[in-house]
Image: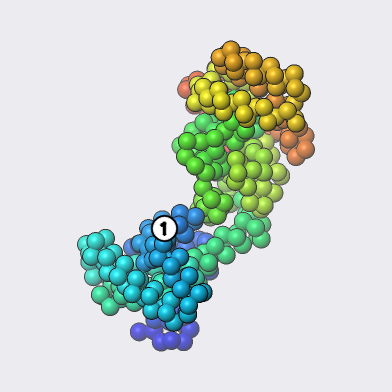
Amino acid sequence: MFTGRRECDFSLRPWRCRSSDMTIRFTSLSDILDQDYDCVIDVRSPAEFAEDHWPGAINLPVLDNEERAEVGTIYVQESPFLARKVGAAKVFRNAADHVEQRLSHHPGSWRPLVYCWRGGQRSGSFTWLLQQIGWRADVVEGGYQSYRRLVNDYLYKTELPHRFVALDGYTGTAKTEILKRVQSLGGQVLDLEGLAHHRGSLLGDHPTPQPSQKAFESEIAGQLARMTPDRPVLVEAESSKIGARIIPPRLWSGMKRAPRIAVEASIAARCRYLLAGYDDILSNSEMLRIRLDGLRAHRSNAVVDGWLQLIDAGDKPALTEALMVQHYDPAYETARRTIGADVVATLRAGDLGEADLDRLAADLLGELDRMSSG
């Protein structure tokens, strides 16, 4: 039995501290990722949950989006007391529905961990109800805000302990595919384009919408916190933004300093690869015209007009090659010179087919192992 005074629950885990009989405080991202509760429940509204949430949490809102807005309006326009009274009725009504519909199958030994925005009334009320039933529920001290502070400190304030290696290469050298294969072979890989839901260029839109900046950072922090600093972390050489998402400053600093391993491939091989991988983009003539017309500030009118003529002619191969030679390759060279990239090894690609990509991934993993042992 815990009293109201602060005491550390060393009998369970050395990092877990209690400030009441049901409140748990976490002090690092590793603590959060290693927590051993049966389930983490986010009781915030669906909109709050969609913007960002704890890794692996499920959403059981005790106030939905409209109810939360209604209670907030009452608080501001009428009185805090009335808002708490109306809110409490809605919270317990929704909580009862969750117990009956979604949680009724859990045994008495079930141990959920509950949080809301700042560890206040929503999570406290829901946790109290679960405890009265007999479940061993705890609430997160500070709620989501405490988690967000840890993510922010990790990516914005402290020096990351990882050694990054950047996979370099012009557009169309299948860098993302090679990353995935290295990861499947056991390499430590941070796939930023995958986490950002974007293919990392002007024409890199992904069918899935990009996550919020906070959710993007949560995924980055969660993956890095699980990786060992003893081995290199492979990332793709990127700009500081992927679509609308910004690479956090501590990670970006590490990426700029990272030694680079370059992939080289012929124009023909790159063109074939891009035609297959970007067919959805290349087939959308209206979108292409709008996007490419917006590059007149960076490329001459004659160059852009030539691209638009190739779109009108439906000549995807010629357009792909023209974009590589006249836009993407020069832009990549400029970025490479600005950063001052140090290329420590070069991998020569063949046709960029399946067998060739497997070979490149194996060779790249070998380079990473040599860098790790050295």
| Residue 63 falls in image quadrant | bottom left
The answer to whether residue 192 is above or below residue 43 is above
Using a 10 Å C-alpha cutoff, classify the residue at mark 1 as few (fewer than 14 neighbours), some (14 to 19) or many (20 or more): some
Residue at position x 61%, y 25% in the image: 289
Of residues 67 and 212, the one drawn nearer to the viewer in this rendering: 67
Of residues 18 and 300, the one drawn nearer to the viewer in this rendering: 300
Q: Is residue 121 visible?
A: yes
| Residue 42 falls in image quadrant | bottom left
Residue at position x 35%, y 62% in the image: 60
Residue underneath mark 1: 46
| Residue 305 falls in image quadrant | top right
Q: Is residue 360 visible?
A: no
Residue at position x 64%, y 38% in the image: 238
Counting labels gives 1
Q: Amino acid at mark 1?
A: Pro
Residue 357: where, in percent of width, then height? 51, 25
Residue 113: where, in percent of width, then height? 38, 67
Q: Quadrant of the C terminus?
A: top right
Residue at position x 45%, y 57% in the image: 47
Of residues 106 and 204, the one drawn nearer to the viewer in this rendering: 204
